[in-house]
Amino acid sequence: MSKNYYNILGVNKSSSSEDIKKAFRKLAHQYHPDKGSGNSDKFKEASEAYSVLSDDKKRAEYDTYGQTFAGGAGPSAGGGQGFGGFDFSGFNGQGGFDGQNGFEFDLGDIFGDFFGGGTGGGRERAKRGRDISIDVELPFAESIFGTERKILLSKTSLCAECGGSGAKRGTEMGVCAKCNGKGKVHETKRSFLGTFSTVRTCSDCGGKGKVPKEKCLVCYGAGVRKMEEEVSVTIPSGIDDGEMIRLTGAGEAVNSGTSGDLYIKVHVKRHPLFKKEGNNLTTDLTLKLSSALLGEEYSFQTLDGEIKVKIPEGVTHGEVLRVKGRGVPFEKGRRGDLLIRLSVKLPNKLSRDARRMVEELRREGI
């Protein structure tokens, strides 16, 4: 049974990253195994939940599918957040875990240096916007032949006025005073393990090394803003109900980073006559007894036009007729077939003449 990570941390699905971080710190302080009143099982459970919900990509996957596909399902998955899949930066001098020697330190930096997950090892994780998931309903015919859809989304996007720079149009960018144009800031901290040096992305310029001399009047220097944006989606032919389409970079934007992805879940409406089976379409056709015995030509309405279907003599109940090239389009312009399942309808009552003719057929062994 899958765990509810939001319940474990005591937050809801709309909680911000900061709220999730605060909730984890509180539980980590409460259950840390080094404390006399600690609980190692609950500590591991909280760490597992935080390792998923603190990562934008893993959180989006968890919200969409109820699981993650990037190794974020357990605390041992370790995705660059330090030791054991969670962020030790909560256990600093203010948290009460070092408090005896008066050192200010960040265990996330220390263990990051040892295990390659911190910023000091040159493997800093790039900033990435949140993924978005939406649902789209399609008529059956559009799911078979494919279509184009325009979807209006309300999301955080790059500011169209400044192009994401955060600068007022027509003004120049200046050198960031905090990092002196380097985009990174060196920090040295003392800990009970010694002195450690780390390199962090500059918080003022976001790693660009430059800041706007005059801020954009639309986004106020953020480079991104909440807005409505129309996204064009190509629905491929033959898509099944419940399938997902992923548009890379169509999710929410983030300043000085890459945009998240857009996940589109497709819901296909049922058709009253046709069903999809692989690359074939199936349908049912009810025949009169006379048509089954003598054969007949039927006009048949398919998803892409009317066709003539010839029923041969002597067909049986449940027999399947195959109409080639009238099924689902797939690779290189090829199409599956239309399969027509025949059903012979027998009359409930016979007239006197009809009964006489049937008795004659019986005498002939039919």
Image (tube, rainbow, N blue to C red):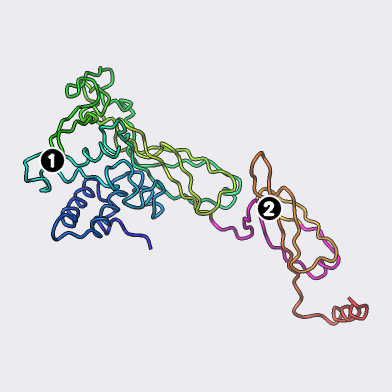
Q: What is the quadrant of the N terminus in the image?
A: bottom left
- Residue 341, relative to residue 88: is it above or below? below
Residue 125 found in image quarter: top left
Check disc 2 and report the residue beneath it. Answer: 302
Where's residue 131, x and y in %? 37, 43
Along the viewing direction, whichever of 121 and 131 lies nearer the viewer: 121
Q: Residue at x 50, y 54 (%)?
A: 242
Spatial CA span between label 2 and label 1 = 77 Å
Residue 85 falls left or right of residue 326: left
Q: Residue at x 24, y 45 (%)?
A: 87
Residue 10 found in image quarter: bottom left
Counting residues from the start of the chain, the first of labels 2 and 1 encountered is 1
Residue 350 falls left or right of residue 273: right
Q: Amino acid at mark 1?
A: Phe
Where's residue 17, x and y in %? 25, 46
10 Å neighbourhood of mark 1: few (<14), some, or many (≥20)? Answer: few
Q: Amino acid at mark 2?
A: Thr
10 Å neighbourhood of mark 2: few (<14), some, or many (≥20)? Answer: some
Marks 2 and 1: which is nearer the front?
1
Check disc 1 and report the residue beneath it. Answer: 192
